[in-house]
Image: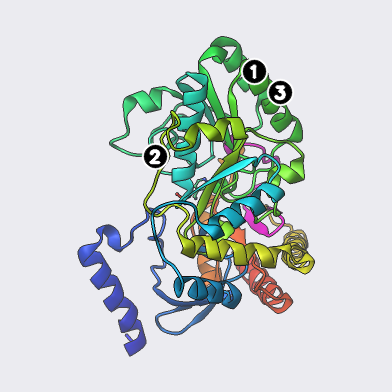
Amino acid sequence: MSSTAARSQAIIELAQRSIPGGVSSANRLVEPNLVFTCAQGAYIFDAEGKRYIDYHAAFGPPLLGHCNQEVNQRVIETLSQIDVVGVGSNELEAQLAAKLCQHIPCAEKVLFCNSGSEATYAALRLARAVTGRRKIIKFQGCYHGWHDAILMNVISPAEKLGQKDPLSAGMLPEAVENTLVLPFNDLEAVRQTLEQQGQEIAAIILELIPHNIGCVLPQPAFVKGLRDLTRQYGSVLIFDEVVTGFRHGLGGYQKVLGITPDLTTMAKAIANGYPLAMLAGRADLLDHCKPGGDVFFAGTFNAHPVGVAAALATLEILERSESYAHIFGLGARMRQGLCDIIQKYSLKATVAGFGSIFLVYFMEPPIESYADLLRNDATKFVAYRRKMIARGIYELPVNLKRNHISLAHTSADIAETLEVAEAVLREL
Ligand code: PMP
């Protein structure tokens, strides 16, 4: 073992001695077990100093690339003025909220917290409060965070697809019972459920594009149907745009689709890597959360100036017309290049994605629901990514995970990636 590889090993051993599995988040421990000690722009560097083009992007936050200097500078300036005060309104928070209300179609008001899970938790609590109902509907393959109300049937074995399949011990059975899980893109299933239990359904929550299983595009008629049905039955419609928010445009994917929910949650890319999340939506709903209102919403670190300053700087960069043009242009080029390779070698594979997102599934279309993705060759999917990693391209080697392009990626990065992908796909 070289002395540099010894450095990785030492860090892993130190971490595993005091942290369960050596990592603080369930999806972080994957083979090969690498230790990254530096992240800059489009690249991450392991403890041995090896460079990788990063498409994992920490599941999505660094939309501008890692350690963006403008964002970091704003954070440093802010921290030289203020940290947490914990009382009253804050100027930066007010400015950020005003900006978000301009950009996001459903946002009449905004509340800030620290993670996507907190935001979806608050959205569901609010929906239950305003409807006086208990049950919620979520969809197979959609992930909305780690809390009891929705941690089920994200990636489940085929035999559990129609069930709730709680993903964690310790979840309250009442929470599981009150969460119905339906197939994505299946409006008929939603209609039937509402016909039978409509008066008990507080909310329908969905990832507008289920990116937690790669990229399954919604049929516009499905989302439009959810909008109409939730109005008809008096349920709250929640678009979880924790991944798609900012990544697919300043107004999220709801703006692309032209369909407006009652509530939305966004996080990840909003502050380019600093912790910040938000719940936004109709003022008459959000106002239940105001101090003294009937829905309790609080947090010591909510709207922390670090995250808020980072978000303001991030949005300013995204508002420049060339930003999305660059990111989406590279995304389109990557998807086209991968399609060309698949065609050239007649591979049983499909390229999926939108905007800055791309991935190769090892299966043929159609891809409309999680059930379809059971046809994906998971062994090949992971083997492909491990071989890419060995050649300096980091795509998370976990079945169905998506890849992200950032503003920091260049045409040269895409060309290098496609060259490596061709070599790897040919030998798979
Ligand atoms: N919603 C979606 C769509 C997500 O992808 C995630 C995180 N992967 C969450 C919610 C939860 O966000 P967090 O990890 O910040 O709690």
On screen, residue 419 above or below 371: below
Q: Position of residue 247 (x, y in %)?
A: 65, 56
Mark 2 belongs to which amino acid? His
Q: Which residue is mark 1?
A: 191
Looking at marks 2 and 3 on the same chain, the residue that comes earlier in the sequence is marked by 2
The residue at the far top in this view is 196
Q: Which residue is mark 2?
A: 147
Considering depth in this image, is 183 or 77 the residue closer to the camera? Answer: 77
Considering depth in this image, is 223 or 112 the residue closer to the camera? Answer: 112
| Quadrant of the image occupied by residue 152 | top left
Considering depth in this image, is 71 or 8 the residue closer to the camera? Answer: 71
How many residues crowd mark 3 within 10 Å: few (<14), some (14–19), many (20+)? Answer: few
Q: Quadrant of the C terminus?
A: bottom right
Q: Position of residue 200 (x, y in %)?
A: 50, 15
The region drawn magenta spans 351-371
Q: Quadrant of the N terminus?
A: bottom left
Report the mark closest to the observer, 2 or 1: 2
